[in-house]
Image (cartoon, coloured by chain):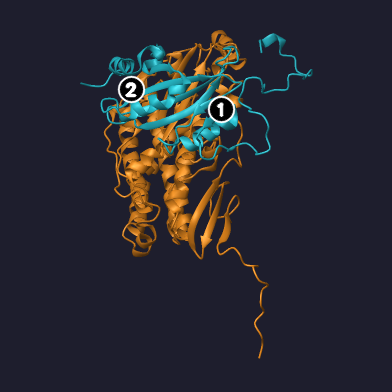
Chain colours: A orange, B cyan
Amino acid sequence: MSEHILLPEGSIEKQTTTLNLGPTHPATHGVFQNILELDGERILKATSTVGYIHRAFEKLAERRPLYQITPITDRLNYCSSPINNMGWHITCEKLLGVELPKRVDYLRIIIMELARISDHLICNSIVGVDSGAYSGFLYLMQFRELIYEIYEEVCGSRLTTNIGRIGGFERNFTNTAFVKLEKFLATYPKQLKEFETLFNRNRIFMERTIGVGAISAERALNYGFTGPNLRAAGVDYDVRVHTPYSSYQDLEFTIPVGKTGDCYDRFLVRNQEMWQSLSLIEQAYKKVQEFKGAESEVFHADSPAYYLPEKKDVYTKMEALIYHFKIVMGETDIPAGELYSSVEGGNGELGFYLISDGGRSPYRLHFRRPCFIYYQAFPELVQGGMLSDAVITMSSLNLIAGELDA
Amino acid sequence: MPLNNDTIQQTLIRKFGDVLTDWQEPYGMLTFTAPKEINLKVLQFLYDEPTLNFRFLTDLQAVHYPAKKGQELAVVYHLHNLVDNVRIRFKVFTDIAQPDVFSATALYQSANFMERETYDFFGVNFTGHPNLIRILNVDEMDYFPMRKEFPLEDQTRVDKDDEMFGR
């Protein structure tokens, strides 16, 4: 008969387990840490730590001319870089007083809504992966590739796009870009429908997500939620409607809202937003096609002092060469002013607070990053839940490390 | 009656009198300055007053103005009335030698991280914050990097000559 090994008196004082979820845990999808205090599998307390990929963007921006800040904004929410780029361009255009032609606005809407689809597509399919359904991810991921091919055709890069310029685009959309867009519009709805059929009424998926990570509308507002996460809690706040930019007021769309603010509602809201984005792209594309003749060649504002000219003009025209030189060397002073401008990013209100004292670069630039602000609700969302629910809540909030840290 | 900047300004002046100064409207957003001692009173009034109803803290950050002696640091609040869809901005200035500002965390949960970030980069000491520690920078850091006295590039470098381009 074997005897039990007796532990010395007082050696087990702690009844709970401490678990480090992150910074490099595969379930966190990004570099941030959650220190969980667990009783069995139940979470008693969560502590969040951020800052693992802080890159001092705000300090960097204080020494750069405006056009050099665009690549910085790419690296905020890198799942939807074009929205960040456009948000920055729109902020600069407001400060400089540049008026955009309608065609440029519609082209921007096409790019921004494509970016929104690629953002929501990743988030929703990852929610699927984290709840044990891998195939949805494989079905949708190939369509992100189609979106990235369109970016590539327009600006030459895929993930960190640096798309567009202050005052428009760097070049006109080629015919290939529109062909690729049409291909995407023709094939994606069918796949999205299939994705919804797989998930929306799937018993396992519903049991895993309904009531998990829920937040009331009041708490969500107090925590500074914006975007799909706020709308899932039942507040119909959308920057595209409240403060229209880039001619969103010309197009018809609805804002899907949820009710309970749990993972399931966030999933449904994002899915519905993808349908709305598809409809917005179709409407904007139709409007782009209405421009005929010389109007269909317009892809930037007539604002030579601030718009970085096309390379072929730089090599052949004197004025373009002069302006190119002045802009690139940072010789163009920007007007003094103070301005807050925001766009509806993939995760919510992406704001730019810009103070200029009239020099070549901003005196102060602050990014209002939606992720950073709503991440502080995470401990409250997961408290009392299971460990596996924390993982799914994290992915359904769509936390992007780049946006957390700036 | 729709809420406009004039109404907001008059309501605030009726309540607080002329301690609120520097009324401006850059790019259409009402902006004013309050003494730092009453920042919470202004926030609470904007929150509670039914005609104003500013209940969403959009953004909170600081700006460093080294030339303004005694008022070097500005803490800037952006508030949003989501019902009438109006935004306002208000600032409080504080001495950099004693940068104490009352924390808004009791009113807005969202202020927690934002105030920690502001502390981290500018050293604004938010009185009453539950957990005022560094958030993005390393804990060992002993300075506040977004202040203007820290230049981005090493000023002692001699291998780069930017004389021609006005840097």
Furthest residue toward right? B158
Q: Is residue A211 above or below residue B145?
A: below
Q: Is residue A337 above or below residue B82?
A: above
Q: Is residue A161 visible?
A: no
Quadrant occupied by the C terminus of chain B: top right
Q: Quadrant of residue B142?
A: top right
Image-based side of A44 in relation to A195, left or right: right
Q: Residue at image x 42%, y 15%?
A: A98
**Residue bearing mark 2:** A292
Question: Could you give the CA–CA distance between mark 1 and mark 2, rounded to whole angstroms?
Answer: 56 Å
Q: Position of residue B69 (x, y in %)?
A: 58, 12
Label 2: which secondary element: loop
Q: Which residue is most to the left? A: B1
The disc at residue B124 is 1
Q: What's under tag 1, amino acid-wise? A: Val
Q: How many marks?
A: 2
Q: Are marks 1 and 2 on the same chain?
A: no
Q: Quadrant of residue A385?
A: bottom left
For mark 1, give the secondary structure.
loop
